Every structure is written in C-alpha cells, then in structure tokens.
Image (spheres, grey):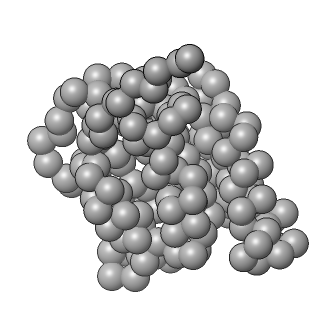
Amino acid sequence: MSHKQNIPFKPLNIAVLTVSDTRDESNDTSGQTLVERVESAGHKVCEKVIVKDDVYQLRAIVSTWIASNHIQAVIATGGTGFTARDNTPEALLPLFDKSVEGFGEIFRQISYDEIGTSTVQSRALAGIANGTVIFCVPGSTNACKTAWDKLIKEQLDASHRPCNFVNHLKNIDLVCDSRN
C-alpha cells in the first residue's frame, strides 16, 4: 500500500508576458486575466510586460527571467498563431532545456471542445529552462482562461498529485521584491 504524502501549496514567483503589436496596459485583457488568476491562486506576479512580437525582444525578456534567481514560471500570451508576426514559438523554443510536448497537445485537446477545429491553429507550447517553466498560450482572453484554469494552475501547485512542475523549479522559497 502506498502512502500519499500531503505536500503543502507553495507560492511561486511568476512573470506574465503579453506578446502584441497593438495592446497596451489599458486593453491587455489577456495579460490582466492571467495576473488575476495567478494572484487568486496564491502565487506572486513579479513582473508583467507587454512586448512587440519580435523574436529578439521576446528572447531578451524571457532570457532575463530564465537567468533570474527569483522567477520560477513564465506565462506568455500571444504570438502563437500563423500570421507573419506570430513568432513566440520561434523565439522561445531555442531557449528551452527541455520541451513539455504534452502541454500543447492537451491544450489543443481541451480547446477543441470550446472552438472546434480552429484549435489546430494554436501553436501553444511549454518548456523548462534553468529551473523555470515557460508556458506559451494564444493571445485571446478565453484561451488564457482555458490554459490557466484547466492546465497550468494544477501544474504549478505543489499539492497536485500525482505530479506537478514545482519540484523541477529553482529557488522556490525566494520571494520577489516587487512587480514592475
């Protein structure tokens, strides 16, 4: 007989990145939705940034968070489609030490019930780099709600069983000072 160990919830330091050529803080409903959900789950949003859909700007920002001692997770919204300006996968995939193939697969499976075959146009992906888990989800507010509520939230909860990402993350006891 196996014994389930009760592991308590551990708040993580999370960075939220909105990838968009048109949004700013006044109309970034996707980024704000993620911030609200992250905070209501008990985590801390250390940084929230809106960046143009440019491969090198994306890499620069996320590389800084990967190198940081206090960011354990990044959630990027936007830039995962097929337009010429959708560059999130191309920008961030090379930064991953390991890809989380199942994330995109499960996200699209869940999304199928909501948007049907249009889900094939989502290039949602995730990976781990330097003890930081990075989730890349579509830019729609509904996609952010789906990704957080049905997938990411449990995987960033140390008490979720049988497994979650928390044990794979760096410095989970460090607290970030403030949100930019």
The quadrant of the image that shows the C terminus is bottom left
Q: Horizontally, is 145 left or right of 93 in the view?
A: left
Q: Position of residue 115 (x, y in %)?
A: 76, 77
29, 55: nearer the viewer? 29
Image point (22%, 27%), residue name: 173
Image point (67%, 31%), residue name: 99
Give the tally of numbered discs.
Answer: 0
Q: Position of residue 1 (x, y in %)?
A: 56, 17
Q: Horizontally, is 31 left or right of 177 in the view?
A: right
Farthest residue, direction bottom:
27
Image point (52%, 75%), residue name: 141
Q: Quadrant of residue 49?
A: bottom left
Q: Quadrant of residue 26?
A: bottom left
Q: Is residue 54 visible?
A: no
Q: Is residue 22 visible?
A: yes
Q: Quadrant of residue 169?
A: top left
Farthest residue, direction left:
177
Q: Position of residue 10 (x, y in %)?
A: 28, 37
Q: Position of residue 8 (x, y in %)?
A: 29, 35
Q: Horizontally, is 19 left or right of 41 in the view?
A: right
Farthest residue, direction front:
1
Farthest residue, direction top:
1
99, 87: nearer the viewer? 99
